Image (cartoon, rainbow, N blue to C red):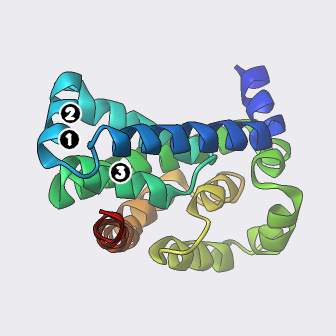
């Protein structure tokens, strides 16, 4: 297991390129098949997935936090497009919170060396000075988690090698994530709708 985790850190750039290519291919397929532009076709696509559709999406959202290869905003957009604003928000929230807690626990188990590989040395050094000051890091973490533009995935890994208790981390995630996810989900879905109207 430890070797697999280390491999992910070492090959993050390759995973980023592959996942980006896969995302582009899926978006192109979805657009050509009318999944993004035709509500009936979108519903038919989700119906084919059956009751597994929300679970599959939850797993994808959790994984993209643990292996931060795509911006979380992309997943938020897909959640709203596929499931609508209410269910999309709920699934985004649950998936991201689960992934955040997994990232924390993985970082706590495998330590600083692994976190540096996942976040990059430059990012780690930027925030490392806050790790030495427990109260300062917790306040900074809570503030950044609340903001929609912060690198949440990497911050969860940093929290895992801090002195922050898991209970406090979980409370910050559960209370701080809804606002940012709501902004992403609503804002990006509006932009996506405008883009579709512009090219249709």
Is residue 67 visible in the rendered image? The answer is no
Q: Are marks 1 and 2 in contact (CB under 8 Å)?
A: yes
Residue depicted at 36% across the width and 72% down the height: 191
- The residue labelled by disc 2 is 46
Question: Where does the image place residue 25, in percent across and percent down from the top left?
Answer: 52, 38
Is residue 74 visible in the rendered image? The answer is yes
> Closer to us: mark 1 or mark 2?
1
Q: Nearer the viewer, residue 127 or 61?
A: 61
Q: Residue furthest front?
A: 200
SS class, disc 1 = helix
Q: Residue furthest left?
A: 40
Above or below — where is 104 with respect to 142? above
Question: Where does the image place residue 188, in percent across and percent down from the top left?
Answer: 37, 69
Label for residue 78? 3
Q: Earlier in the sequence, mark 3 or mark 2?
A: 2
Question: Where does the image place residue 60, in percent across and percent down from the top left?
Answer: 44, 37
Q: Nearer the viewer, residue 192 or 7?
A: 192
Screen quadrant of the C terminus: bottom left
- The residue labelled by disc 1 is 42
Screen quadrant of the N terminus: top right
Q: Nearer the viewer, residue 195 or 47?
A: 195
Residue depicted at 20% across the width and 33% down the height: 46
Q: Quadrant of residue 138?
A: bottom right
State how far apart marks 1 and 3 are (Cα).
Answer: 12 Å
How many marks can you see?
3
């Amino acid at each position: 297991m430890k070797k697999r985790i280390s491999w992910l850190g070492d090959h993050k750039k390759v995973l980023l390129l592959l996942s980006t290519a896969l995302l582009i291919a899926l978006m192109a397929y979805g657009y050509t098949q009318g999944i993004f532009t035709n509500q009936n076709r979108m519903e038919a696509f989700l119906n084919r997935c059956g009751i597994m559709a929300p679970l599959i999406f939850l797993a994808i959202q959790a994984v993209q936090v643990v292996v931060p290869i795509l911006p979380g905003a992309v997943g938020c957009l897909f959640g709203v497009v596929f499931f609508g604003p209410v269910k999309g928000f709920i699934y985004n929230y649950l998936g991201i919170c689960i992934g955040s807690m997994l990232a924390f626990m993985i970082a706590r188990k495998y330590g600083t060396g692994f976190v540096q590989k996942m976040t990059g040395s430059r990012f780690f050094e930027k925030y490392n000075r806050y790790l030495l000051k427990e109260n300062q890091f917790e306040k900074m973490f809570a503030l950044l988690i609340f903001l929609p533009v912060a690198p949440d995935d990497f911050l969860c890994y940093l929290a895992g090698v801090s002195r922050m208790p898991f209970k406090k981390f979980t409370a910050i995630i559960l209370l701080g994530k809804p606002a940012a996810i709501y902004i992403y989900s609503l804002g990006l879905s509006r932009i996506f709708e405008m883009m579709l109207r512009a090219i249709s």
